[in-house]
């Protein structure tokens, strides 16, 4: 097929068992469909612009960048190279411009060669939060993120909302440690937030010491260390991005479910769209309704999680899909 599709991966890199690997699967699916492919990997933020330029120089006609942190480099490249189709995982175009205030002179329309691949992962995470609240024995659930930006905090928002909704329905007081449902929480930070499993184990142990029995880490391979720690402690975890009971099969005995993004599907879809002549000018939003986000099967917990709780999660999924309930209704900051 006469179209070259490429992906610029974020820091955390391939082998993260999460969103980079999901984007890689989308690229592999494109290769299997007959597209020529290439990719680049970032060791740090200073690599973003150079990696994108290298892919441009290699003749890439679609370039998908992975991760919110590449926003500026991607926007600059899209504007400077109108003949190349760009897409970005975990980002919608900021039409409000640098000041984030719509309706004034610095507004920036979506370029005709850009597609934002955004995911309402808070919807799927709300289902996981409700499940966790119903399954927890201690009534304490923990979460933390790699860095504080929307692609991370949406997961944490969903967990908070799911727990809050469970408490409303059941008259319970299950609590979430690590995120307040507004703007304050626990984040790894530093120069290696996404690829430090040992740090993830430490963070999980700190939560275990506070009585937490389920952890939802949103920190790439760092979070994988937390899942390992929960397995070692005989406790549980909620995975992120992909079905981590499959991608981290060695830790499946701790993973109740995962809040998933169908990144691989949307990457392949945008490549096919571009090759068909549509270079962009729009954002895609993955929701429960269009199956752009979902929670994974319960695998070995299928017979452990009560039928009643499973049915309640399905009912909540239906309500969220139809817009009868929204995540923001159950956040501390509201809608």
Image (cartoon, rainbow, N blue to C red):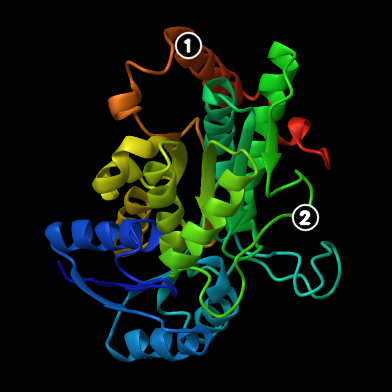
Per the image, label 1 sits on a secondary structure element best described as helix
- In this rendering, position of residue 181 left or right of residue 305: right
Circle 1 Cα neighbour tier, 10 Å, few/some/many (<14 / 14–19 / ≥20)? few
Percent of width and height locating residue 102: 82, 62
Residue occupied by mark 2: 184
Residue drawn at x 53%, y 75% as measured from the top left: 70
Circle 2 Cα neighbour tier, 10 Å, few/some/many (<14 / 14–19 / ≥20)? few
The relative height of residue 148 versus residue 191 in the rendered view (above or below) is above
- In this rendering, position of residue 159 left or right of residue 228: right
Residue 120 visible to the viewer: no
Pair 2/1: label in front: 2
Query: Image quadrant of residue 132?
Result: top right
Percent of width and height locating residue 79: 55, 81
Per the image, label 2 sits on a secondary structure element best described as loop
The relative height of residue 140 versus residue 103 in the rendered view (above or below) is above
Percent of width and height locating residue 331: 76, 37
Question: Looking at the image, which is closer to me, 9 or 285?
Answer: 9
The relative height of residue 137 versus residue 218 in the rendered view (above or below) is above
- The numbered disc on residue 311 is 1
- In this rendering, position of residue 116 left or right of residue 230: right
Quarter of the image containing the C terminus?
top right
Percent of width and height locating residue 213: 54, 36
Residue 217 visible to the viewer: yes
- The numbered disc on residue 297 is none
């Amino acid at each position: 097929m006469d179209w070259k599709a490429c992906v610029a991966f974020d820091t955390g890199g391939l082998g993260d068992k999460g969103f980079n690997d999901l984007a890689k699967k989308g690229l592999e699916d494109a290769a299997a469909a007959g597209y020529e492919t290439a990719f680049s990997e970032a060791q740090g933020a200073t690599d973003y612009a150079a990696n994108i330029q290298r892919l441009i120089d290699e003749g890439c006609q679609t370039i998908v960048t992975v991760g919110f942190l590449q926003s500026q480099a991607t926007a600059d490249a899209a504007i400077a190279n109108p003949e190349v189709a760009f897409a970005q995982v975990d980002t919608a175009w900021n039409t409000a411009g640098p000041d984030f205030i719509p309706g004034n002179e610095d507004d920036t329309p979506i370029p005709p060669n850009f597609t934002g691949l955004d995911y309402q992962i808070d919807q799927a995470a709300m289902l996981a939060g409700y499940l966790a609240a119903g399954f927890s024995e201690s009534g304490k659930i923990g979460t933390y993120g790699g860095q504080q930006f929307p692609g991370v905090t949406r997961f944490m928002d969903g967990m908070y909302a799911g727990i809050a909704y469970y408490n409303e329905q059941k008259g319970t007081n299950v609590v979430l440690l690590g995120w307040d449902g507004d703007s304050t929480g626990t984040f790894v930070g530093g120069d290696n937030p996404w690829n430090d499993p040992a740090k993830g184990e430490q963070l999980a142990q700190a939560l275990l010491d506070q009585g937490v029995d389920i952890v939802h880490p949103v920190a790439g391979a760092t979070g994988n260390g937390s899942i390992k720690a929960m397995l070692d402690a005989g406790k549980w975890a909620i995975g992120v991005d992909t079905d981590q009971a499959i991608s981290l099969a060695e830790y499946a005995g701790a993973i109740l479910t995962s809040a998933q993004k169908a990144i691989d599907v949307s990457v392949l879809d945008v490549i096919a769209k571009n090759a068909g002549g549509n270079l962009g000018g729009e954002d895609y939003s993955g929701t429960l309704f269009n199956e752009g986000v979902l929670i994974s099967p319960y695998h070995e917990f299928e017979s452990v999680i009560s039928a009643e709780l499973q049915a309640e999660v399905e009912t909540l999924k239906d309500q969220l899909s139809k817009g009868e309930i929204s995540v923001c209704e159950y956040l501390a900051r509201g809608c």
